[in-house]
Image (tube, rainbow, N blue to C red):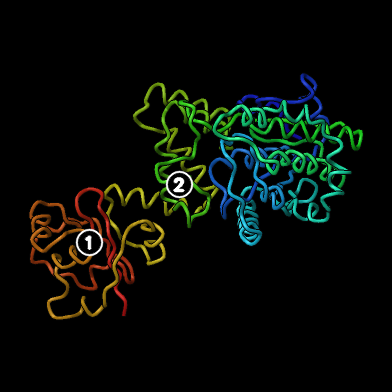
Amino acid sequence: MNDIFAELSWRGLINQTTGDDSFGSWLNEQPRTVYAGFDPTAESLHVGHMLPLMLLRRFQAAGHKPIALVGGATGMIGDPSGKSAERNLLSVEQLRANVDAIKIQMRQFLDFDEAGSGAVLVNNFDWMQNFSYLDFLRDIGKNFPVNVMMAKDSVKGRLERDDAGLSYTEFSYMLLQAYDFVHLFDKHGCTLQIGGSDQWGNITAGIDLGRRMRSAQLFGMTCPLLTKSDGTKMGKTESGAVWLSPERTSPYKFYQYWINVGDDDVGKCLRFLTELPREEIEALDKSREEEAHKRESQKRLAESLTGLVHGDQGLMVAQRATEIFFGGEIDDLNDQQLNAIFADVPSQQLSRDRLSAEGGLSIVDALVEAGLSKSKGDARRTISQGGAYVNNRRVEDTDKSLSAEDLASETVMVLRSGKKNYALLRFAS
């Protein structure tokens, strides 16, 4: 086994632990079973989920056994931790769809097939659905002193707000998550729960319930939240969250998010989210100090995370897209690759006959059809001023006609106006 405690410590990933000074030695004594929970509030995980996922991945690499818990039951209630208002409750059907989608994404991070330390994927709805309300109150609820629950930051913070209270439903969340820990101890010998720092109250509630119900000594560890230097959450953009699903956030946009991380934040991201060795990260730290303009840290971060989340193909598409969006010529690509690169670019469909008709399709008409010019006069001005491009090659002749030879792939032509305004023309038979 590798010294996981030392690894987490130098990366700055340990915020709080139970067991005080003995936690590190306990952790390294023998392989432990460790779990983290994920509420299925959407059909995809987002950047904020990467930190606990990478923690589980690190534990597995060190020889420990990870359990990824998808909260099909707790997701019906919503965790009040770190929330200023109560969540909208999702339907059972939507929760099931979310759980199924999230399970697939988790397999990108964890090895569920390896013997011994092979990861386990569980859904707490599988055991919570067997409880009646009275049974749960009698068997679980009696072990929770209300005064202790009221003292938890996740509860106290909401109760102290004038603009938002706390429903009994959300108040009960802590009980459900605490019982998850007990159930995983019973079924899998799980003795450690990990999570973000906002989960400390829920984690310690589970530890206390394990002691009361099973006389078990359980442990907990939290990591810092993934925030920027200004205190705002990492993974948030003007258009919303940065998702792990390529349908919600394209590999190009995902790659670009990390390329644009600030110098004050990139060092923490390299430590928290990548598996790069200490020597390389410290060399990148030095590079930022001496040659920040090269942005070597951001490039390495984007490359590492995009490859992990979207695979080699997704990384290739993202890097190729980056070259293209910075003016690189478009060639040797097929429809599928172009569609992935330009997933967020508007497109129009035309008949392929337009390319084979006598005289072909004029560049002026193409710019108008693509929506890059408001009129033919506007299109001519764009061309004469040097701002019109086909497949990132400048067009200077206002009388130019486009044919099938100007396609960037089997059916797609890429037009550009100015530096960054792209549009696709798709030619169907």
When the figure is inspected, residue 54 is found, relative to residue 291, above or below; the finding is: below
The residue pinned by badge 1 equals: 371
Q: Residues within 10 Å of mark 1 (few under 14, many from 20)?
A: many
Quarter of the image for the N terminus: give it.
Answer: top right
Return the mark for residue 98: none
* Chain-order first, disc 2 or disc 1: 2
The vertical placement of 426 against 43, above or below, is below
Describe residue 48's horizontal placement relative to residue 369 as left or right. Answer: right
Q: Residue at x 71, y 35 (%)?
A: 194
Residue 358 place in picture, x, y as percent: 13, 80
Residue 300 image point, x, y percent:
46, 38
Residue that appears at 50% across and 53% down: 312
Mark 2 secondary-structure assignment: helix
Answer left or right for 189 relative to 372: right
Q: Is residue 298 left or right of residue 135?
A: left
Outermost residue, right side: 215
Per the image, the residue denoted by label 2 is 254
Q: Who's the residue at 73% across and 41% down the image?
A: 172
Residue 186 visible to the viewer:
yes
Which residue appears farthest toward the top when viewing the image? Answer: 21
Position of residue 19 relative to residue 390, above or below, is: above
Residue type at mark 1: give it: Gly
The amino acid type found where label 2 is placed reads Phe
**Dot 1 lies on which element?**
loop
* Marks 2/1: CA–CA distance: 26 Å
Instruction: Estimate the x, y position of residue 313 in percent, counting from the top left.
Output: 48, 56
